[in-house]
Image (spheres, helix red, strand yellow):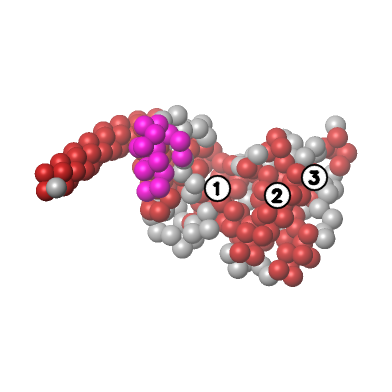
Amino acid sequence: MKKIKRIFLHTILILLLISGVFLAVVFGQGYFRYKEEVKNLPIEKAVESYTDKADYVPFNQISENFVNAVISVEDKRFFERKGYDLIALGRALYHNFLAKDLIEGGSTITEQIAKNLYLGGYIGGLKEKAAGIFMMRALEQKYSKEELFSLYVNMNYYGDGYWGIGEAARGYYDRDAKDLTLGQAAILAGIPNAPAIYQLSNGYELAKERQEWVLQTMVNNHYISDEEMKEALTEDVHPIIKQQLSN
């Protein structure tokens, strides 16, 4: 019995050692990938490629309804968390290690920004995943949460040719991002998950179904009440500029 226990413990130690060496190699490769990327395109320059656009919408010009909707469905600990989301990061690394491949990506807003800035919105393997973690750390050191949130919603695609929340709010509802109603905000917050499916020109009914889910997460996360959700669901959130969408 003692011999079996000893063999078991040795096996666990060996597996832990192999895991540690594997992760060290992956993170080493990721670090060099990160350094290569930022050498070719410094983080400030990458961010400025969005913030310098004429239609870029800063945080203080975005509807609180929209902010709460996005946070609720994308990264509910975003504003409170300092640094990495260790829970999500640990879960992703564990699952990826077991699969010896990337089967679970990062879900935080900052990591999605890093992927969009440097990795083309796509992570092809563990090395890229590790590189994204270093990029995420650099972004959170250089920019506030409000700046990162604004960057994220300005780089997202909302279907029907609309890039960024400014274009989407004006294109679909002929209003500024700061004036979005709760119903409109919940509709738009749900589109980037699958723009081809939820864009309002041909996916309105599916977008309405996702809107209800977005609103329910807002209730669950205590951003709105059940009554506010019910009221938002009665809003007419058909796109105002219908002629433009039909062309």
Q: Name the residue furthest right.
A: 243
Mark sitting earlier along the chain (2/1): 1
Vertical order, 107 against 124 (above or below): below
Q: Residue at x 59, y 58 (%)?
A: 72
26 sits left or right of 11 in the view? right
Which quadrant of the view contains residue 176? bottom right
The tag on residue 205 is 3
Residue 234 appears at what percent x and percent y?
82, 60
Q: Residue at x 43, y 50 (%)?
A: 88
Vertical order, 95 against 230 (above or below): above
Q: Type of residue at label 2? A: Arg
Q: Type of residue at label 1? A: Leu
Q: Nearer the viewer, mark 3 or mark 1?
A: 3
Viewer-side residue, 138 vs 24: 24
Q: Residue at x 72, y 45 (%)?
A: 168
Tag 2 residue: 210
Characterize the local packing of mark 2: few (<14), some (14-19) or many (20 or more) Cα atoms within 10 angstroms. Answer: many
Magenta stretch? 90-104
Residue 228 appears at what percent x and percent y?
73, 68
Contact flag, marks 2 and 1 (Cβ < 8 Å) = no
Residue 41, visible in the rendered structure: no
Residue 144 appears at what percent x and percent y?
46, 56
Q: Type of residue at label 3? A: Glu
Tag 1 residue: 151
Q: Would you say the magenta stretch is mainly helix, strand or loop?
A: helix
Q: Nearer the viewer, mark 2 or mark 1?
A: 2
- Secondary-structure class at tag 3: helix
